[in-house]
Amino acid sequence: MKRTIYLVLIFLACFACKKDDPADETDDNLTSDYYFAATINGEKMLIQEGIDGYANGSSAGGGSTPDGFQQEQGAVFLGGTNGYVAVIILKTFPETPDQCSQMDGMFHIGSYPFGQTSISADDYGKDGVVIYYIDADGVYWSSGYEPATQSGSSFEIIEYTDFTAMFSSKIMKAKFNCTLYDGEGHSKMLTSGEIRSKCLYCN
């Protein structure tokens, strides 16, 4: 199966001036409106747009499944040197969605289950949210890797507002905790997670 993924970023944002006031009280070092903050295996991390080479933007993609098309919509931070993170919403439609209203409907204030990305046209996948993380050593972690056990985990969007930009039309803010897996039997606990990001990319 050919699976398409688009990472849409405006890298000029990396060079924007710092803001005078923090966007949130998540961390004393928070200076950007768009950020990913969490504690992973006891170690605090904070990724911000415009800091250490990071840019923030929307992501979109998807692929065929036995019962339709699993659409991906979400947010990504990349371009820095200390890792990469993404928060992706998955939803399966009977056919490939071609309306922005369909993608917009994937986002809502409230809780989400954790999902799994369909890896082939023969794989159903599981709708919900998936959190990806590439650490400083280049190891790829995901809440959706097997065994993908998420007992006691949670994900909730607490803000979803309009935004005007070339590749994003919404801003979302979410809080979460989960277990990340590397696909080789290792796991890491992610706690106190919070993201505020541009999202919703559609033509």
Image (tube, rainbow, N blue to C red):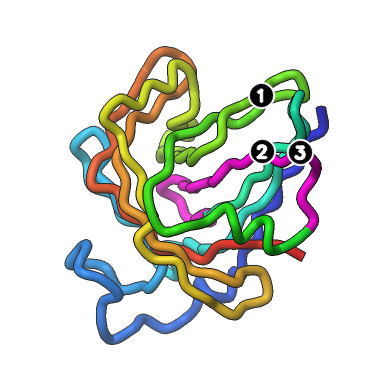
Q: Nearer the viewer, residue 77 or 125?
A: 125
Is 142 on the left or on the right of 150, as rendered? right
Residue in view at x 82 percent, y 33 percent: 2
Give the image quarter of residue 148. Answer: top left
Mark 1: few/some/many CA within 10 Å (<14, 14-19, 20+): some
Horizontal side, residue 21 vs residue 19: left or right: left
Q: Is residue 161 magenta?
A: no
Residue name at image x 32 percent, y 54 percent: 194
Task: Measure the C-alpha gap from mark 3 to mark 1.
Answer: 12 Å
Question: The C terminus appears in which quarter of the rendering?
Answer: bottom right
Q: Amino acid at mark 2?
A: Thr
Q: Residue at x 54, y 69 (%)?
A: 170
Looking at the picture, which amino acid does disc 1 mark? Tyr
At mark 2, the secondary structure is strand
Q: Given contact means CB atoms under 8 Å apart, are the residues at marks 1 and 2 in contact?
A: yes
Residue bearing mark 2? 92
Residue 125 percent location from the top left of the image: 61, 26
Viewed as shown, does residue 10 lie left or right of 128? Answer: right
Q: Nearer the viewer, mark 3 or mark 1?
A: 3
Confirm whether residue 36 shows in the render. Answer: no
Disc marking residue 124: 1
Of 184 and 97, which appears nearest the observer?
97
Q: Which residues are magenta?
A: 76-98
Kindly identify which numbered label has been placed on residue 94: 3
